[in-house]
C-alpha cells in the first residue's frame, strides 16, 4: 500500500504542478527554502550575482516568484526597447527589514550596471509578468508582491523611461492576474481580478498604462461567493476568440469556472457565468464538488482552453467521494450563443493518476466506479429499466487496474499492460469481449491518458 501511495501521490503532485496555462502571469507554483541559496550562478547570471554581492557588501538571498512563467530570481528580458537583454533580480532586502528588493540592470561594454532598485515590504514574490501596457514599444515589468493565494497580493508596474525606471503601484490588491490582448490584438492589458470583501464586490478589470498612471478601461462583475481563485488561464476559449477562464473555490469547497471575454460588438467586458450586482449565481453550470474539482485546461492539445461541466454517472448519486463516479464534460465557450460546446468527455481517477476518454456510444449506457483498496476502475453497463425502474448495474465491460512491478511479475491473469509509470503497471481486462459496448484492447490503449506529462 505504501508503494502505491508514494508513486501515485508523486504522480498527482506532478500533475498539479504541470497543468499548462496560457499566460505569463499564471500557474500553480512551488516554493522551497532550499532554492533561496542556490549554487553559484554562471555566465551572465553569475556576473549579475557578483554585482549584487559587491553592491550589497554581503551575500544576497534570492527570492523566487511562486507563480507564473518566470520562476527565476534573475530574469533576463529586454525592458529598455534596445533589442538587447536587460535583467531583473529579486532578493531579500539587505537593510534588515525582511522585505524584497527588485533591481533593474542593463548590460554595458564593461559589464552589468544596476539602473535602479526598489524595496517592497513583502516577504514573498507572487509572480513576474511582462507586457507593453502603454503601447510605446517597450515592455513593462509587472511584479506581484505577497501571496495571491491569501488574497493579499499587491502589484507594481515598472516602466522604463529615458530618466530611468518608474514604479507605479496598483491601488487595490488582487486575487489573480494575467497579461491579455482581449480588447485588440495590438496592445497588451492586465486582467486583474479581485475577491469580494466587506466593502467591495468581486470584479474583473482590464488595466492599461497611460501617461504614467494605471487606468481601468473596462470592468465586469464576478461571482462574490468565491473565496479563493485556484487558477487563471488566458488564451483561446473557442476558435478565433480569446478570453479568460477563472477557476475558483467556494465556501463548501466546490469549484466553479467563470468566463471573461471582450464583446466586440458592444465594446464591453463580459462574464456570463458570474453574478451581477453582487449576487452570486448559485446555479453556475460549471459547479463541481471537491472530488472532481479539476481546473480548466487544454485537454485535447488544440490550443483552446476547455472548462469542465460535471455530471454524476448513473447509479452513483451517493458516491460523492469517488472521482470515477462522474463524467467530466470538457467544453469550449461559444460567444455567439453564450453556450458551452462539448468537445469530449472523460472519466478521471485522480486517486490512481489517469483519465479515460469516454466514447459517445457509452453516454447514458455505461457507469463507472473505482476501488481505492484494489486500485481498480470498472466500467459497467447501466440497465435503466431494471431495479423497479430505478436502474441497475449490469455486466462489467472494462476494468483498469494498477499493479506494482512485483504484483505484475507474480501474475495478473487476463490483464494486458496498457501503460507504465513510476514503477507501476496500468493494465486492462475486458471481462466480456463480445459485449456490444466492450472496447478492444487497442481502443483502451488509445483512450487512456495520464493526468500529467512527464
Image: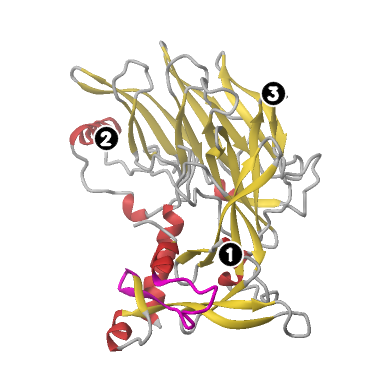
Foreground residue among 434 and 324: 434
Mark earlier in primary sequence (1, 2): 2
- 44 sits left or right of 247 in the view: left
Task: Answer few, some or many: residues within 10 Å of disc 3's Cα (few below 14, many 20 plus, some between 14 and 19).
Answer: few
Q: Is residue 52 magenta?
A: no
Quarter of the image for the C terminus: give it.
bottom left
Is residue 138 placed above or below 380 in the rendered structure?
above
Foreground residue among 34 and 422: 422
Using the rendered view, name the quadrant where residue 209 is placed: top right
Is residue 450 placed above or below 19 in the rendered structure?
below
CB within 8 Å, label 3 to label 1:
no
Furthest-top residue in view?
162
Task: Answer few, some or many: residues within 10 Å of disc 1's Cα (few below 14, many 20 plus, some between 14 and 19).
Answer: few
Q: Where is residue 132 in the image (x, y as percent from the top left)?
A: 47, 22
Q: Does the magenta stretch include residue 431?
A: yes
- 298 sits left or right of 111 in the view: right
Q: Dot 1 corresponds to which residue? A: 361
In this view, the mark in front (3 or 1)? 1
Foreground residue among 23 and 62: 23
Q: Dot 3 corresponds to which residue? A: 267
Can the viewer see residue 449? no
| Residue shown at 64% from the left, 60% from the top | 310
- 252 sits left or right of 306 in the view: right
Q: Dot 2 corresponds to which residue? A: 57
Looking at the rendered structure, the secondary structure element under dot 2 is: loop
Q: Where is residue 270 in the image (x, y as percent from the top left)?
A: 70, 34
Q: How far apart are marks 3 and 2 (CA)?
A: 53 Å
Looking at the rendered structure, the secondary structure element under dot 1 is: helix
In the image, which residues are magenta? Answer: 419-441
Mark earlier in primary sequence (3, 1): 3
Amino acid at each position: 500500500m505504501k508503494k502505491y501511495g508514494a508513486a501515485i501521490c508523486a504522480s498527482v503532485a506532478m500533475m498539479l504542478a504541470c497543468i499548462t496555462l496560457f499566460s505569463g502571469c499564471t500557474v500553480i507554483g512551488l516554493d522551497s527554502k532550499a532554492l533561496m541559496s542556490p549554487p553559484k550562478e554562471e555566465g551572465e547570471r553569475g556576473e549579475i550575482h557578483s554585482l549584487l554581492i559587491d553592491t550589497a557588501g554581503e551575500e544576497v538571498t534570492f527570492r523566487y516568484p511562486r507563480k507564473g512563467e518566470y520562476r527565476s530570481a534573475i530574469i533576463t528580458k529586454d525592458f529598455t526597447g534596445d533589442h538587447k537583454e536587460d535583467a531583473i533580480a529579486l532578493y531579500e532586502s539587505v537593510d534588515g527589514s525582511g522585505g524584497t528588493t527588485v533591481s533593474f540592470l542593463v548590460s554595458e561594454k564593461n559589464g552589468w550596471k544596476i539602473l535602479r532598485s526598489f524595496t517592497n515590504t513583502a516577504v514573498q514574490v507572487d509572480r513576474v509578468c511582462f507586457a507593453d501596457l502603454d503601447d510605446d514599444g517597450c515592455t513593462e515589468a509587472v511584479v506581484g508582491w505577497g501571496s495571491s493565494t491569501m488574497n493579499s497580493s499587491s502589484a507594481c508596474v515598472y516602466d522604463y523611461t529615458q530618466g530611468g525606471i518608474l514604479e507605479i503601484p496598483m491601488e487595490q490588491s488582487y486575487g489573480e492576474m494575467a497579461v491579455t490582448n482581449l480588447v485588440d490584438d495590438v496592445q497588451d492589458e492586465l486582467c486583474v481580478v479581485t475577491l469580494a470583501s466587506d466593502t467591495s464586490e468581486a470584479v474583473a478589470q482590464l488595466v492599461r498604462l497611460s501617461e504614467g498612471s494605471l487606468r481601468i478601461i473596462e470592468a465586469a462583475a464576478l461571482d462574490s461567493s468565491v473565496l479563493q481563485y485556484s487558477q487563471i488561464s488566458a488564451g483561446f476559449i473557442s476558435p478565433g476568440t480569446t478570453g479568460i477562464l477563472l477557476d475558483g473555490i467556494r465556501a463548501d469547497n466546490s469549484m466553479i469556472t467563470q468566463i471573461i471575454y471582450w464583446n466586440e460588438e458592444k465594446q464591453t467586458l463580459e462574464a456570463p457565468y458570474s453574478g451581477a450586482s453582487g449576487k452570486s449565481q448559485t446555479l453556475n453550470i460549471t459547479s463541481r464538488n471537491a472530488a472532481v474539482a479539476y481546473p480548466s485546461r487544454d485537454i485535447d492539445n488544440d490550443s483552446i482552453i476547455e472548462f469542465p461541466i460535471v455530471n454524476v454517472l448513473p447509479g452513483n448519486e451517493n458516491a460523492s467521494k469517488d472521482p470515477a463516479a462522474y463524467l467530466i464534460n470538457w467544453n469550449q465557450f461559444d460567444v455567439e450563443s453564450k453556450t458551452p460546446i462539448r468537445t469530449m468527455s472523460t472519466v478521471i481517477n485522480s486517486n490512481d493518476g489517469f483519465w479515460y476518454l469516454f466514447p459517445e456510444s457509452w453516454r447514458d449506457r455505461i457507469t463507472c466506479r473505482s476501488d481505492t483498496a484494489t486500485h481498480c476502475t470498472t466500467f459497467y453497463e447501466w440497465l435503466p429499466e431494471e431495479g423497479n425502474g430505478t436502474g441497475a448495474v449490469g455486466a462489467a465491460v472494462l476494468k483498469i487496474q494498477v499493479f506494482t512491478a512485483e504484483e505484475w511479475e507474480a501474475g495478473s491473469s487476463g490483464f494486458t499492460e496498457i501503460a507504465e509509470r513510476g514503477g507501476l503497471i496500468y493494465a486492462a481486462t475486458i471481462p466480456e469481449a463480445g459485449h456490444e459496448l466492450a472496447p478492444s484492447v487497442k481502443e483502451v490503449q488509445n483512450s487512456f491518458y495520464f493526468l500529467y506529462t512527464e
